[in-house]
Image (spheres, rainbow, N blue to C red):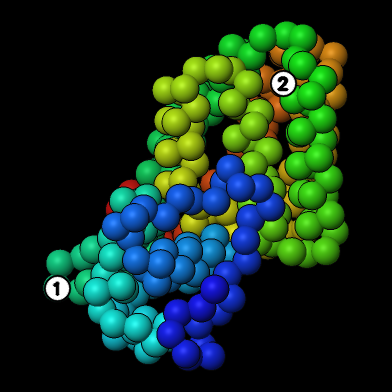
Amino acid sequence: MTVGKSSSARKITKPPLRNIEPAVSAREPAAAFVIARAIEEDIVLGRRQPKERLVEQDLCEQFDTHRGDVRLALFELEKKGLVERIPNRGAQVRGLTPVEVMEIYAVREELEVMAVRAISFPVAPKDIEKLVKLQRQHSAAVAAGDLLTVFYSNLSFHQLLFGLCGNACLIETIDLLAQKVYGIRSYAHAFPQSLDQARCDHLDMIKALRASRRDDLVDLTRRHLKPSPEAYIRAYERRFGKNSAAG
C-alpha cells in the first residue's frame, strides 16, 4: 500500500502473522497508518538514527500527503515511545541514553523471567509446533539477510512464548517495554554472529520447553536480552561520548 502517487513512498512489507499486524482504528486514516509503519520500520532497521529529526515537510513530500496525516503518524509513534517532540525543534527519533536502556532492560529481564516461570509444564505440543514454525521463518530470514522479517518473526516468537504464561497484564507490559526499544535492535543485527546467536537461542528455548526444563529457559531468557543493549550502548558512546551517557 502506498500513500498518494509519489514513487518515493515505499511499499510496506507485511509481517508474517496477522496477530502482530497493528489494527487500524476507524478514526485513523489509512495514510497515517502507512506513514507510521514506514517510519517505524526505518527506525527498526537503523535507517533512521537516534536523535534524527523528522521534518514534517520532508515527510509530506516523501509520502505525497498533507501535514494532518504526518502529524497523526508522528503522534502514534510518540505514543509507542519511538519518537519524541523537542520544544522549538519538532519531532525526532527518540534517542535513549545508556542509562535509560539499562533501566528498561533490567525491568524487561525481570518481567520476561517472571513470564517463563509462570508457564505451565508440560507445554501443549500444538503450542510448541507454532514456535517451531515461527523459528523456521526466523532462521530463513537470518540466512537471507532479510532483517525486517527477522524483526517480525522474532517479535512473534516471543509474543507466543510469553503468551504461554496466561497472565494478560504481564503479557501486555512485556509488549509495551519491548516496543520502547525497537529502535536499538538494529545495532545487534549489524553483527552476523548476534543474529546467529539469537537463532540458536530460539532453538534452545524450544528444546527447554519440550523437556520442561524451566531453569534452562530462565537462563536463556536472560542471555537472549544482552546483545542489543550492549551493542547500542557501545555505538551511543562512540557517537556522543561517554560523558553523555546519562542524558
Please tell me which residue is depicted at 62% across the width and 61% down the height of the picture: 14
User: Above or below — where is 166 with respect to 151?
Assistant: above
x, y percentage for residue 135?
A: 79, 42
Q: Which mark is residue 88?
A: 1
Q: Identify residue for label 2.
A: 217
Foreground: 141 or 217?
A: 141
40 relative position to 206: left or right: left
Q: Which mark is residue 238?
A: none
- Camera sees residue 173: yes
User: Above or below — where is 44 with respect to 68?
Assistant: above
160 relative position to 216: left or right: left
* Mark 2 residue element: helix
> Looking at the picture, which amino acid does disc 1 mark?
Asn
User: Above or below — where is 110 with respect to 244?
Assistant: above
Indicate the quadrant where residue 74 lies: bottom left
Which quadrant is the N terminus positioned in? bottom right
- Of labels 1 and 2, earlier in sequence is 1
User: Label 2 neighbourhood size at 10 Å, few (<14), some (14-19), many (20+)?
Assistant: many
> Looking at the picture, which amino acid does disc 2 mark?
Leu
